[in-house]
Structure formats: structure tokens, C-alpha cells
Amino acid sequence: MKKMSYKQKIQSEIKKAVNGFADEIIIEKPKLKEHGDAATNIAMVLAKARKRNPLEIANEIKEKLKANTVLISRIDVVKPGFLNFTVSDQALVESLSEVFKLNENYGFAQKKSKEKILVEYVSANPTGDLHIGHGRQAVIGSCLVNLLDKAGYNLSSEFYINDYGEQITKLSDTAWAIYEKLNGKEVIWSEDFYPEEGISAYVKKCSGANTSLQLGGMVKDLILKSQEELLSSFRVQFNNWFSETDLHKNKEVDKVLKNLKEKGVTYENEGALWFKAEEFGDVRDRVLIRADKRPTYLVADIAYHIDKLNRGFDRLITIWGADHHGQEVSLKGALKALGYDANRLEIIFVQLVSLKQGGQEVKMSKRAGAVVTIKEVLNEVSSDAFRYFLIATHANNRMVFDIDLAKKQDKDNPVYYIQYAHARCCSIFRQYKELNIEEKLDFHKPDLLMNLFKSDIPEYTVTKDLVLKILDFPEEVILAAKSEAPGRIANYLKDLATSFHQFYTVCRVITKDTSLTKARLELVEAVKITIANGLKILGISAPEAM
RNA sequence: GCGCCCGUAGCUCAGUGGAUAGAGCAACCGCCUUCUAAGCGGUUGGUCGGACGUUCGAAUCGUCUCGGGCGCGCCA
């Protein structure tokens, strides 16, 4: 049984004090120090329902909780009706000792539900190099997988390979043209072709192809392999790579068509088969089968998502670039038409990345050729910095990737700030070991940890701030998972690093006071554990030294 | 025109309906004989695009409006 956090304890005490309140009692962390360590608005909420003065209610609650000095050292009732609590040092120390017990699992929930979630992301066409926009989706997707996994769900991840249809034909034609060019033949370069620079290196590696399609297949395989290698070079890996071609081969696509027809949500017009998407809220109907009998991307995508559900996943999360948001309604509409619960599918749209270089914003546009590839950026930046930059901004927001800043390998680069805090913790332990002190640290004794708080104002304040920050971590993981925003962890870690650096500046850890030294070493250990666990979610390394 | 996303400090961005809106960068001023100065402290900087509404309380919720991005293919 997991122990309750000090917040949960306060929450349950209040619940007892205000009998008959069904909703969740909100405990929040006040922004101002004068407002204590935890606050609740419960009196104001109750005031309305019970038609009474909130201050009176607050005072009644205060009277009931006053006796619990083990948990709460001070209660204030303020202006409109806030109850502000100051948590006792004893309660903090007890919570802190949990960090050591859980260690590399601190902040992470146990696998609580059997619910299986599949996150599909990147799913780029195998028709060229991955650009920075794919990079953002890759980082967000992989962090989300880590986050939900650590929040207690059963996660799986997948890359959908668009290896069928038009773009493969185009790829083959492009490759063939490059091939002919390499052999000194004159070719007419079509505007429809993919950019030569993204393909030619792969064409050069191929030999023995007799037809454009054969060559295209070889190039496709090489591109896929290089995409996989590139992605894993910044710690993006998938449980499964799913081929679109298989859906066609296995007649899954045909099945979808047949079922849609049976449901009466299709019609023929001008030789094409249409899906009545408008009936499901779309701005227009969508083509399923073209006049030349080739199926569209949409049919395959419907078949793919149904296949995922049939494979036993309870929840599907699909990550798309924001330029694809127009496809959501028709896909979900088709799922609904076929009797599936479309709410089991959630599509996260990642807004586009624009780039800043030399103070100038460069728009990402394939047509304009202003595409910056992941490879180019990774040539300049570490994968740690790359991941940090791309995760720190919420997916809903467009982000500006400042290439010059990301290239910097100095303190302007915020990822180092967090990593440095971790390295500092490790450094302190190295220092301690050099003193040849044999005595083993005991991380399970609240009595020892109480020494943390036996000090005066400046030291007491930074110490308590740091402890409180560390204790926020499990809730932060839950909140981030709930809102599916792994970037919150990056922000949290920055705050935690700040608290630690402040503590480090004010409090010397290794001193002649042995019990204080031991207590502070344990606090440093707790910081190290928390930062390492947070960075694990982000897929960023936690260096022992820098 | 219709749909989705966004608008918070000079720049990049945080901010589960709470109290006096924050951080980093940039600018300026301080702090290393002591565990890593990749650090810490301070100063300057805001009509949270605007209006109205809901609420005891709004950057946060609703409506409208202005501005920006993206989408509205028998492309993917």
C-alpha cells in the first residue's frame, strides 16, 4: 500500500471535517509563501451550497483540524475564505523518506489498469529525409509513451509505413530519373518528383534494378532503414512498424469498403465511390475509390485504425502534424459508421515548427525547399538538447526552433541547467566518498532527516522549498499524463533544478556537523533520484559529471 | 467563406477558476581561498490582443471581435 502524500492527508482530514461533500476537495499550492504550503477553497465552495458565510465555515474546519499537529503546524483563515496550511516538518520528512524507498520508481505509478494504449506517431512517408517537424512529433510521441507508461498504463508504440500507392510510384519515378541521370542520360525532371537531394544518395547505393518500380522498392527499403536508425539515434523507438501494403494484401481495405457500402454510407458519383462524410460533420464528402479504381489514403487509414482496435487496444492515440487536422472528422466518422466507438481514438495534432536562424524566421515548406532535416540539426546539437527543445513547448502551440540557440553548447541551452543539477548531486557524493568516511548512509530514518530543518531562516527556507518541490513530482507525473502533456515534466524539472541550485548556494552539504551532513546528503540523493526519473520520461540522459 | 490551432514581458515560452501573472534569454549591477560560477542574488520590463458575459473570484469558462498559422484534392 502506497503511503499518502501530505496533500492527500490534508485532503482526507478536510473530508472528514466537512461531512457530506461529495466532490473532490481541491488542495492547491499557493503562489505566495505567506499563504502556506497548501490551501483550499472548500469553505467558499460550501458557502454557496449551504448558504453560509465562508469565513465561518473555514473557521469551523480550522477548529477541527487544529489538533493534528503531527501533520499541520499552522492553519490560517484568510479574506474571502481560504484555508492556508503550513505542513509540519515531521510530515515532510516522512514523505521524503518514501523517495528513497521507491528510488528509481519514485513518482511512477504501479501498473494499475489493464487498459492497453497504442500510440502511433511519426508515420512519415518513405520518400525522403525526415524534417524537423517529424522530429517534433517523434519527440512528443516517444515522451508521451514514456509518460503514460510511467503513469501506470500499458503502452505500445507503432510507426505506420505509407508504402503503398501514389507516393511509391512517385518515388520510383524520381529514383529512376536520378538513376538515368547518373548514367549520363538526359531526363525530363517532373515537378511532381520528390526533391533530388533527399533521394539521390539512396539511388547510388542500389544496383541491379531493371525497372523503376524495382528501384523504387530498393530505395524505399533503404530510406526506411535510415529513418529507423536516425530516430533511434535520438531515442525514438517503436514496438512495431506497420506496413500499409499489408492492409491491401490482407484484404482489410476491401473489407472496409464492403462494410461501408453495407451500412449505406457510400454512393457513386462520376465514376468514384464516395463516403458520406458530411453526414458525420465533415465539411464535404470524401472519395474512397477513385474513378480509376485505386483506393484513396482515407480507406487504408480507416482499415488501419480498425485493425488497431481489433488487435485489442482499448485506446488509440494517433499523432499527426497539424496540417492533417482536416482528416480527423472523416476518419472518426467512418469508424462510427462501422459501429466502433470513435472516442477510443484520440488524435493529437502537433503544430508546425518554424525555424529561426540568424535572427530570421524560415518557414517550413517542402515546396519552397526550405526544409531543415533532423540530420542537419543533429549534426549540430546533442540528442539531449534536441529532445528538450522539441518537448518543452506544448504540441498545440506553434514553436520556433532557434537553430543558433540549439547549436550552442553552453549555459544558454536550458537542458544543461537540469543536467548540471544532477551532475552537481553526483559530484557532492564523489566528494563525500573522497573523505573516506566508512559510515553507510541510512536513507530510511525520518529522525535523521529532521536535522534538515534544524536551522535558521535562509537555510530553512531553501531546504523546505526543495523538499516541497521534490514531493510534487508524483502529482506532476499524474497531471502531465492526464493532460497528455509530457512537456510539463520539462518545466517541472527546470523548477526543481532551480530549487536545488538555490539550496546548493545557501546550504553547504558536507560540513563538520555529521548529522546535518548526513541529512543533507540524503536530500541531495532525493534530488538526484527525482531529476533522473524525470529525465527518464523525457528520454534525456542524466550525466554523473559535466 | 467555412473548420482546427494559437495570441501572456523586447525574444522564446510556463501558468489543474483563486489571493500581488512567472521563468529563461536579452540589458544593467553584484557574488568564486570553501561540495563544479554550466551556479546564485538584485534592477529594468505587462491594459494576459480587444469587448461583453458567467462567477464571491477569469490569463484560464462562454459569446462576439481583431490579428496570425494551418486546412478545406479522385495528394498523403
Image: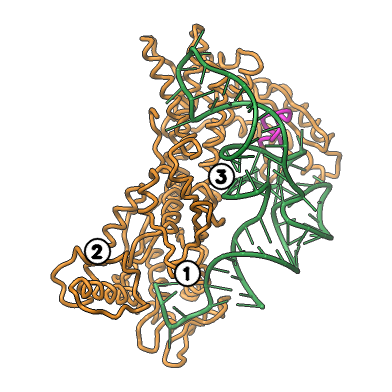
Chain colours: A orange, B green
Residue type of the residue flagged with mark 3: Leu
Q: B3 or A251, which is in the foreground?
A: B3
State how far apart marks 1 and 2 are (Cα): 41 Å
In the image, what residue occupies the spot 75% across and 27% down? A64
Residue occupied by mark 3? A479
- Looking at marks 1 and 2 on the same chain, the residue that comes earlier in the sequence is marked by 2
Residue A116, how many percent across, how many down? Answer: 42, 54
Does dot 1 land on a helix, a strand or a loop? loop
- The answer to whether residue A186 is visible is yes
A254 falls in the magenta region: no
Marks 3,2: beta carbons within 8 A: no
- A346 sits to left or right of A35: left
Dot 2, crowdedness within 10 Å: few (<14), some or many (≥20)? some
Q: Badge 1, how many Cα within 10 Å: few under 14, some, many 20+?
A: some
Q: In which quarter of the image is residue A441?
A: top left
Point 57% across, 78% down: residue: A283
Rendered view: A504 above or below A227: above
Q: Where is residue A301 shown, x and y percent of the image?
A: 41, 71
Q: Name the residue under label 2.
A: A202
Q: Name the residue under label 1.
A: A340
Which secondary structure lies at badge 3?
helix
Q: In this view, does A157 lie above or below A533?
A: below
Evaluate if marks 1 and 2 touch, with contact meaning CB atoms under 8 Å apart.
no
Front residue of A191 and A135: A191
Residue A344, x across and y down, in percent: 49, 62
Task: Label 2: state its secondary structure.
Answer: helix
Between discs 3 and 1, the one toward the N terminus: 1
Report the residue at 48% width, 53% height from top: A357
Segment colored magenta: A29-40
